[in-house]
Image (cartoon, rainbow, N blue to C red):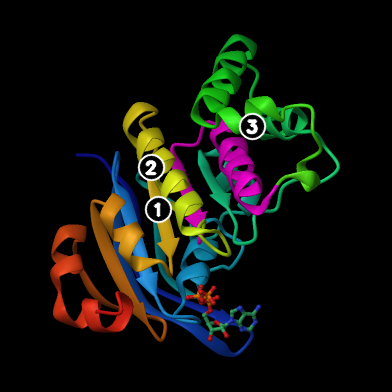
Amino acid sequence: MTRLLELKGVNSFYGNIQALYDVNLHIDQGEIITLIGANGAGKSTTLMTVCGVVQATSGRVVYNGDDITRESPNRIVAQGICQVPEGRLIFPELTVQENLDMGAFMRSDKGAIKRDIEYCYDLFPILAERRRQEGGTLSGGEQQMLAIARAIMAKPRLLLLDEPSMGLAPLVVRQIFEIVKKVNEEHNTTIFLVEQNANLALKIGHRGYVMENGRVVLTDSCEKLLADESVKRAYLGL
Ligand code: ATP
C-alpha cells in the first residue's frame, strides 16, 4: 500500500494562537479518511496545513514521499492535492459548464477533460440539466455538487473535502456522500473528509481520526469508531 500523505508531529498557529498540537496522521492511496471533531477542534486547520494555506510551525507534512511542509499552495495543488473548502466557493457568475472548465485549467489533456466533464455530469445529472445556468442561481446542495465536480475536474490524486454536508438537507447530504464514495472507488481518488456530521462520514470512510482541542485523540477503522462508546456519546448523539 502506498503512503500518500503523512503528518508527523505537526504544530500550527494563527499568529500566537496554537491550533494544532503534535498532529500525527496518515492516508494511504485509495483510502477515504474521515476526520471528525467539534467546532473549533482543528479540522479545517489540518486541511489547510496539508494544502499549505497555513504552514506548520514544526513537524512535517509528507506527500507521496516528498516533504511539502514549506511548499506554496500553488505548488501543492500542482502536485495533485485539491481542496473543496468549507462554504463551497464556486464562481457564482460563471455557468455550471464554465465552472467545470475552470477546474481543469491546469490540464492540457483535452480529450480526457471532455471525458471527465461527461463523467461529472453522469455523477451529478442535475448539473448536466443546469449546465448553462449561472452557479450562483443553484441551490446549496447543487452548489456543493458543483464544487466537488469542479475539484474532480482537476484530476486530483488527493481530494480534501471540508464539511461538504454543511447547511444541507439530510437527503442531499446522503446523495453527496454516496457520490464521494463512488469517486473514490471508480476514479481511484484518495479522499480526506472533514465532517461534523460524524454518523454519515464514518459510514463512508475506511479509517477515521477524532480531534479535540487541536489534538488527535482517537484513531481506528470507521467501523470501530462507530461502535466506540465515547464517539457515540460525543459525536453520534446516542
Ligand atoms: P469548524 O468545524 O468550526 O470549522 P474546525 O474543527 O475546523 O472547526 P478550525 O477552524 O481548524 O476548527 O479551528 C481551530 C482553532 O483555530 C479554533 O480555536 C479557532 O478559533 C482557531 N482559528 C481558526 N481560524 C483562525 C484564524 N483565522 N485566526 C485565529 N484563530 C483561528
Quarter where residue 216 is shown = bottom left
Quarter of the figure with the C terminus: bottom left
Magenta span includes 140:
yes
**First in sequence: mark 1 or mark 3?**
3
Q: Earlier in the sequence, mark 2 or mark 1?
A: 2
Q: Please tell me whether residue 13 is drawn above or below residue 44 in the rendered image.
A: below
The N terminus sits in image quarter: top left
Residue type highlighted by circle 3: Leu
* x 42%, y 42%: residue: 180
The residue carrying pointer 3 sits among few (fewer than 14), some (14 to 19) or many (20 or more) residues within 10 Å by Cα, namely many
Q: How far apart are marks 1 and 3 (CA)?
A: 24 Å
Q: How far across and how far down the image is residue 122, in percent?
A: 51, 23
Task: Give coordinates of residue 119: x percent, y percent.
Answer: 52, 22
Say above or below: 175 vs 154. Answer: below
Q: Is 180 on the left-hand or right-hand side of 44?
A: left
Amino acid at circle 2: Glu
Mark 1: secondary structure: strand
Mark number, residue 178:
2
In this rendering, position of residue 4 left or right of residue 137: left
Q: In which quarter of the image is ligand 1?
A: bottom right
What residue did someone put label 3 on? 127
The range drawn in magenta is 139-163
Relative image position of residue 230 (x, y in whole percent): 20, 82
Horizontal side of residue 60 vs 57, given as left or right: left
Give the residue displayed 44% in from the left and 37% down from the top.
Answer: 157
Give the mark nearest the N terminus, 2 or 3. Answer: 3
